[in-house]
Amino acid sequence: MKNTETDKIDRIRDWEKAGLKVDTSPNAPAQQTCTCPECSASRSAKHRRQKCVTVNVDKGLWKCMHCNASGYVPTLQ
């Protein structure tokens, strides 16, 4: 399936709904890191911006290495 601009926007919105800020551009790496939607806000100021979530954009999987929260965001193929 060919990704259209609308598909790309929908995919970005799906990641944002999950609370994850990832780069979904065509040249972005499949493995990325970001802050956790579950625990980052409650962490100390020193660690609040620490990128503790590992994201696999292609598979739609993410996991926090701090609080062990994880999830799945459906991806367009």
Image: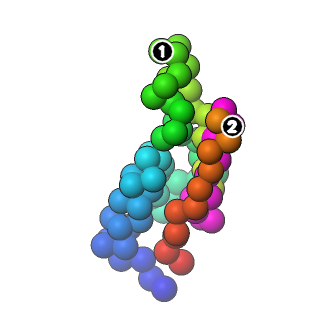
Nearer to me, 4 or 40: 40
Question: For mark 1, what is the residue?
Answer: 45
Decide if residue 58 is in sight here. Answer: yes
x and y percentages locating residue 75 in the rendered image: 52, 70
By secondary structure, the bulk of the magenta-drawn segment is best described as loop
Looking at the image, which is closer to me, 45 or 34?
A: 45
Residue at image position (54%, 33%) is 39
**From the viewer's perspective, is residue 45 above or below residue 68?**
above
Q: Is residue 64 magenta?
A: yes
Residue 75, magenta (yes or no): no
Residue at left offset 30%, top offset 73%:
6
Q: Residues within 10 Å of mark 2 (few under 14, many from 20)?
A: few
Label disc, if present, on residue 23 of the rendered structure: none
Horizontal arrangement in the rendering, residue 26 relative to residue 60 (left or right): left
> Could you tell me residue 50's position as x and y percent?
56, 26
Q: Which residue is mark 2?
A: 65
Which three-letter amino acid code belongs to the residue tagged 1?
Answer: Ala
Give the CA separation, mark 1 to mark 2: 18 Å
Q: Name the residue nearer the viewer: 76 or 61.
A: 61
Q: Position of residue 44 (x, y in %)?
A: 52, 16
Using the image, determine if residue 58 lies above or below residue 67: below
The quadrant in which residue 3 appears is bottom left
Residue type at tag 2 = Met
Q: Which residues are magenta?
A: 57-66
- From this viewpoint, is residue 30 visible? no
Q: Label 2's element? A: loop
Which mark sits nearer the N-terminus, 1 or 2?
1
Describe the element under mark 1 as helix, strand or loop. Answer: loop
Q: Residues within 10 Å of mark 1 (few under 14, many from 20)?
A: few
